[in-house]
Image (spheres, helix red, strand yellow):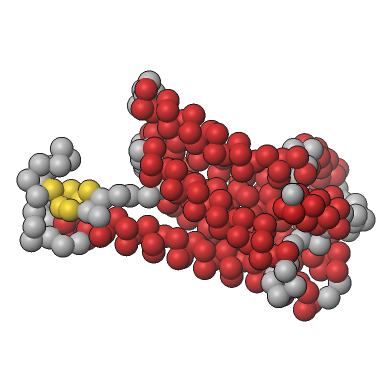
Amino acid sequence: MLTEADRSGMEHLERCAWALRGTLVRAAVRRYLPWALVASMLAGSLLKELSPLPESYLSNKRNVFNVYFVKVAWAWTFCLLLPFITLTNYHLMGKAGLVLRRLSTLLVGTAIWYVGTAVFANVEHYTGSCYQSPALEGVRKEHQSKQQCHGEGGFWHGFDISGHSFLLTFCVLMIVEEMAVLHELRTDRSHWLHAAITTLGVALGLLTFIWVWMFLCTAVYFHNLSQKVFGTLFGLLGWYGTYGCWYLKSFSPGLPPQSSSLNLKQDGYKK
């Protein structure tokens, strides 16, 4: 039996879930969100170049959101999507094999995160040099790696593709794609499954808003335009290459089990 406090808490959670379902789960949001991310990245970058914002707590790389969220963005996304995909997909499909197949999307996402960050690190290494000061004066030719350079008090400068722009773009789009199952989901409100899925849905929605906010902060405070363009494009490539192309094939983890969104996506990508 639920206590009065439990029922009150569940009602608040339901209201949050309803609000999120009315925004993030809509097909129009999934269709236009990639373009909105690109537009906000370009607008924020132009603002940074033409009329920089004054220094603030969010412009400090040691702010709590950057240290405890963005730095481990894939871990947060993975840990919340794992139970969400498991519960929602099993409820809709009822077969453990199909659920495991869908959970492999998280392995694909992990591979995209790992390869992307490794490529960015190598690009920065091979295009960089060690300098004596932040003003890029006095090249230290004896230091051939970023680690050696920093260890000796130098300053490494190379083409530093924005890993934040890359990963936050990919995480936001992946979460929104997976939350599409909420359109099809019908659970007994008194059952534990309803409470678990509602809680996970709200947590994923809040995480998405944090990712979008930090993406905007990256646009207006960090990196230069070309570094953010490349980072965002890699994030879009990771999303479109999976949910827009590969996952439409039979030999893939597949799309979230939602017939209406599947038909919509297939029609949209064929145009």
In the displayed orientation, state which residue is furthest to the top: 51
In the displayed orientation, state which residue is furthest to the bottom: 97
Q: Position of residue 232 (x, y in %)?
A: 49, 46
Quarter holding residue 244: bottom right
Out of 88 and 106, give the one closest to the viewer.
Answer: 106
Out of 224 and 192, give the one closest to the viewer.
Answer: 224
Quarter holding residue 90: bottom right
* Left or right placement of residue 177 versus residue 125 in this view: right
Q: Residue at x 86, y 72 (%)?
A: 94
* Left or right placement of residue 38 versus residue 30 in this view: left
Q: Which quadrant does the N terminus fall into?
A: bottom right
The answer to whether 8 is drawn above or below residue 151 in the figure is above
Q: Position of residue 226 (x, y in %)?
A: 38, 42
In the displayed orientation, state which residue is furthest to the front: 271
The image shows a total of numbered marks equal to 0
Q: Position of residue 144 (x, y in %)?
A: 16, 62
Q: Residue at x 54, y 39 (%)?
A: 38
Q: Residue at x 58, y 68 (%)?
A: 108
Q: Residue at x 12, y 56 (%)?
A: 152
Q: Position of residue 162 (x, y in %)?
A: 40, 48
* Left or right placement of residue 239 versus residue 113 in this view: right
Specify whether residue 113 is in view. yes
Specify whether residue 56 is in view. no
The answer to whether 187 is drawn above or below residue 56 in the figure is below
* Left or right placement of residue 22 versus residue 238 in this view: right
Out of 233 and 11, give the one closest to the viewer.
Answer: 233
